[in-house]
Image (spheres, helix red, strand yellow):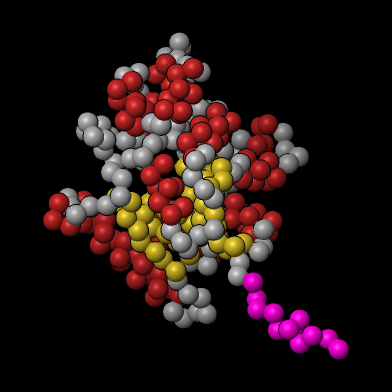
């Protein structure tokens, strides 16, 4: 006799993966990328946070200005190595190489691989995973307002699953720009809800505040551009992790370069 339990096994929940894309040029510390990824990894809604450095800029005029891809991958591996369930992925490189397979170097210059292409590849390769995009507030606003390439495809591919992260700000201390951004995020969520109300889709938009600030204890702006443009190690220690700073200094990258 066949055991009835074999016919009534509960459907296994898909493994939930949060996708966080960044230039990582260089990746910043607790006041920036490290704080964001640590916060995403601490959210019980995800089994994995997948960090995806940009492989190749969408616009040809900006290509060649970033640090080499493998250097940015290695800096991310150093930065996130101690956070459980965080994976640094070369998915953008793999996606570009698949799309451009068979093309010569001149033809490859015209190839543009965007988020929709990347998501299509990931969903095809890993159909048993459930992907969610993690976006900063301004980036989310741009996506909903159609400023991305294939914006609607991106939204549909993740089935409207998005985590929007904002800097933690006390309401009484919020600037006019921060208050405006807060209102725009709410408007965009409402706009998405209206868009899907006539379909069978649902929206799962989570807005979360990142406890770490975007300024260091000494008032330095925590940004990749600030890190690229100084050799002041007092400043750099506020922006970068020790491992990433050592990596940059040893390889004479950015402002440490002999050719600057």
Task: Give the percent coordinates (x, y) of residue 30.
Answer: 36, 40
| The one of 232 and 205 positioned closer to us in this rendering | 232
Quadrant location of the N terminus?
bottom right
Name the main secondary structure of what is drawn in magenta: loop
Q: Quadrant of the C terminus?
A: top left
Q: Residue at x 56, y 38 (%)?
A: 55
Residue 232, above or below 51:
above
Residue 98, relative to residue 105: is it above or below? below
Q: Is residue 96 left or right of residue 143?
A: right
Instruction: Pick out the residue farthest to the top.
Output: 258
Which residue extends farthest left?
A: 172
Q: How many marks?
A: 0
| Residue closest to the eye, 7 or 214 | 7
Q: Residue at x 40, y 35 (%)?
A: 28
Q: Is residue 242 visible?
A: yes
Image quarter for residue 101? top right
Q: Position of residue 144 (x, y in %)?
A: 41, 61
Q: Is residue 125 left or right of residue 57?
A: right
Q: Is residue 113 left or right of residue 125?
A: left
Asked whether 255 or 18 is in front, the reply is 18
Q: Residue 143: in sight, yes or no?
A: no
Q: Is residue 3 magenta?
A: yes
Percent position of residue 73, x then y: 55, 35
> Which residue range is magenta in the image?
1-12
Residue 238: quadrant of the picture: top left
- The residue that appears at 49% across and 23% down in the rendered structure is 247
Residue 221 falls inside the magenta stretch? no
Q: Residue 3's x, y, as percent? A: 79, 85
The quarter holding residue 128 reads bottom right
Q: Which residue is at a point 30% across and 65% down the rendered structure image?
A: 186
């Amino acid at each position: 006799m066949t055991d009835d339990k074999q016919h009534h096994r509960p459907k296994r929940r898909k493994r939930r993966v949060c996708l966080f894309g960044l230039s990582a040029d260089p990746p910043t510390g607790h006041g920036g990328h490290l704080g964001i990824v640590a916060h995403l990894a601490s959210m019980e809604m995800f089994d994995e946070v997948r960090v995806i450095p940009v492989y190749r800029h969408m616009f040809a005029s900006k290509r060649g200005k970033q640090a080499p891809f493998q250097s940015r991958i290695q800096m991310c591996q150093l930065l996130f190595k101690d956070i459980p369930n965080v994976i640094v992925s070369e998915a953008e490189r793999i996606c570009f190489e698949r799309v451009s397979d068979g093309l010569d170097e001149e033809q490859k210059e015209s190839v543009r691989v965007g988020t929709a292409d990347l998501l299509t590849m990931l969903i095809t390769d890993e159909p048993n995973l459930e992907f969610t995009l993690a976006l900063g507030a301004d980036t989310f606003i741009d996506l909903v307002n159609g400023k991305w390439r294939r914006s609607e495809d991106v939204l549909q591919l993740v089935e409207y699953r998005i985590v929007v992260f904002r800097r933690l700000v006390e309401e009484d201390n919020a600037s006019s720009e921060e208050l405006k951004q807060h209102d725009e995020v709410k408007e965009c969520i409402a706009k998405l809800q209206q868009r899907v109300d006539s379909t069978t889709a649902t929206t799962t938009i989570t807005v979360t505040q990142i406890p770490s600030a975007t300024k260091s204890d000494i008032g330095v702006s925590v940004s990749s551009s600030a890190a690229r443009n100084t050799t002041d190690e007092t400043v750099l220690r506020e922006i970068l992790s020790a491992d990433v700073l050592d990596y940059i200094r040893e390889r004479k990258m950015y402002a440490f370069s002999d050719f600057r």
